[in-house]
Image (cartoon, rainbow, N blue to C red):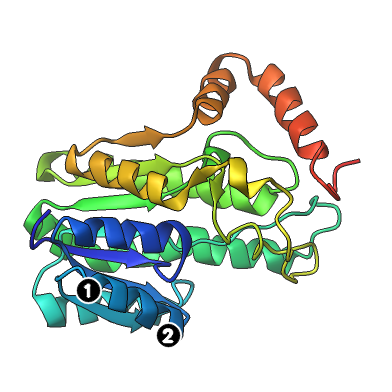
Amino acid sequence: MRDKVVLVTGASSGIGKATALRFAKAGAKLVIAARSVDKLKAVADEISALGTEVITVQADVAVEADCQKLIQDAIDKFGRLDVLVNNAGISMRAILEDLDLSVLKKVMDVNFWGTVYCTKFALPHLLKQKGSIVGVSSIAGYVGLPARTGYSASKFAMHGFLESVRTENLGNDLHVLIACPGFTASNIRKKALSADGGAQGESPREETKMMTAEEVADHIFKATKKRKQKLVLTAEGKAAVFLSKFFPKLIQKMVYNKMRKEPDSPLK
């Protein structure tokens, strides 16, 4: 990955930040994007300290024009793009009956349309380099999670979109990786949207028992280097994907019972 140009969205914290730093440690040049300029600057300082080049771009991936400018800024600076990591994402927690539809739309705009916009504008440049598209997804893209209707929908949509892009480009040597980390210690649950669109605030899960963002980033880095098509992490995640294929009723009951036990669960 030395001297490759890697663009990471949602790079101000969590998996995005860890992934950017992991590629930087391998000598890649970074383009990092997020909505928070101050947080991006702090990440850029860490990357610069590793001895590689980096630029920051303030962008909201839910805005098409922001994504177009993001890709153009990367090309203007480095003249090429080798890896696009679609990491920016947002979650939600509420049953559909109580959910304001604007919440579902916002989650789709960030998780799905953000991936679509960035991939669309980056594609011509990635094809020139026979590069990689990475979608940081979730087990929720394989198993519909109760009280996460918008989140699961966005990840299922991301999977279908990226698989289609991969198949369209079978003759172009384009690499597409769909990475599903499972539950990871990050800010995504604290920032998850509640039924009315407000931030959840506290995570309903024990974060210290989860895989770290740095561990996830290392797996994503290695899978990108090996040009793998799929990455499913944690024993729990792999079991969920397997059971969803062959024992769908069983996994539905297991997932429901697990989610119902969360503190302040919206499930009755």
Q: Is residue 71 visible to the viewer in this orientation of the structure?
A: yes
Please state the horizontal and vertical placement of residue 203, each as a whole percent of the image.
70, 55
In the displayed structure, 42 sits above or below 111; it is below
Q: Which residue is mark 1?
A: 49
- SS label for mark 1: loop
Q: Quarter of the image for the C terminus: give it.
A: top right
Left or right placement of residue 85 versus residue 10 in this view:
left
In the displayed structure, 230 sits above or below 188; it is above
Q: Report the amino acid beneath label 1.
A: Ala
Q: Residue at x 18, y 43 (%)?
A: 225
Q: Which residue is mark 2?
A: 37
Single out the mark in the foreground, 2 or 1.
Answer: 1
Task: Name which quarter of the figure residue 224 lies in.
Answer: top left
In the displayed structure, 109 sits above or below 185; it is below
Q: Earlier in the sequence, mark 2 or mark 1?
A: 2
- How packed mark 2 is, by other alpha carbons closer than 10 Å (few <14, some 14-19, many 20 or more), is some
Please state the horizontal and vertical placement of residue 126, each as a whole percent of the image.
16, 59
Residue 196 or residue 44, whichever sits in front? 44
Residue 187 or residue 86, whichever sits in front? 187
Q: Which circle marks residue 22 in the picture?
A: none
Q: CA distance from mark 2 to mark 1?
A: 18 Å
Q: Report the amino acid beneath label 2.
A: Val
